[in-house]
Amino acid sequence: MDTSEYAISEASSLALESITACFFMSGSEAQNERSTLLSYAAAGTKHGNEFTLWMDPDMVLWIKSDSHRIGDLLLSDGQLHHVCVTWESSSGTSTVYKDGALVKTIGNVMTGEQIKGGGIWVIGQDQDSVGAGFQAKDSFKGYVTQVNIWDRVIGSNEIKCFAKDSGSIMQGNYKAYSDFSVSSATQLIKSLCCPLAPISEP
Ligand SMILES: [Ca+2]
């Protein structure tokens, strides 16, 4: 993958005290460097991005200035997997769901902090500056689609439904997948059409 493959969307000015990001993805075994699924950068962020989710090859969650290793979720087996990551400022808790099941709970994640508003979300690339500074070594290697973001922690039953159902009901109230502009070059990020057939690695 390269830096021409991404999808991008501007954030509202609202800061986030909770978030859920859900998507379908298939990782690639060929990830020897950072493989960025989703990044959010805002002006004046001291330590890079405000929020980033990458694989190296374990999944890692970055919020503001800390990284948290989620671990190997076996997402590079050639199948399409549903993944949700939540974070709540008040409790400092993040949770991770794979295919509708809770697989990881992480504590002490930026308790009491806010994710700044007014930045830019990018699917498939790390941002070294707001909305730009993509590097091929940080590009996502794999396949990602139906990225949706909520400004709250959504319930485990909801997540279970999203993982099982057609995908049409999975629509983030903060960012719906259709809010993202997909770069014309991309094979990495698929359109709204037909996202759910499991794919096999070439
Ligand atoms: Ca970078």
Image (cartoon, rainbow, N blue to C red):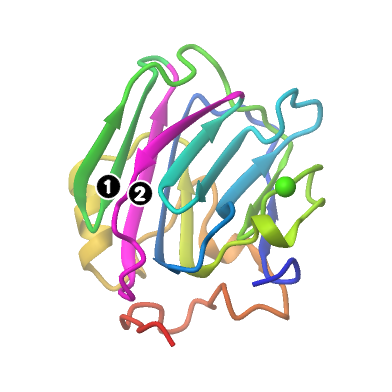
Residue under the image location 78 percent in, 50 percent down: 131
- Label 1 belongs to which residue? 97
Q: Earlier in the sequence, mark 1 or mark 2?
A: 2
Residue under the image location 54 percent in, 16 percent down: 113
Classify mark 2: helix, strand or loop.
strand
Q: Is residue 130 above or below residue 107?
A: below
Residue under the image location 42 percent in, 58 percent down: 171
Three-letter code for the amino acid on which mark 2 is drawn: Cys
Asked if the residue at label 1 sits under 8 Å from ligand 1, the reply is no
Q: Is residue 183 above or below residue 66?
A: below
Give the quarter of the image for residue 70. top left
Label number found at residue 84: 2
As rendered, which of 121 and 4 lies closer to the eye?
4
Where does residue 194 sit, x and y in percent of width and height? 41, 84
Three-letter code for the amino acid on which mark 1 is drawn: Tyr
Q: Quadrant of the N terminus?
A: bottom right
Callout 1 touching callout 2 (CB < 8 Å) = yes
Where does residue 143 sit, x and y in percent of width and height? 48, 71
**Residue 39 included in the magenta stretch of the image:** no
**Residue 74 included in the magenta stretch of the image:** yes
Magenta range is: 65-89
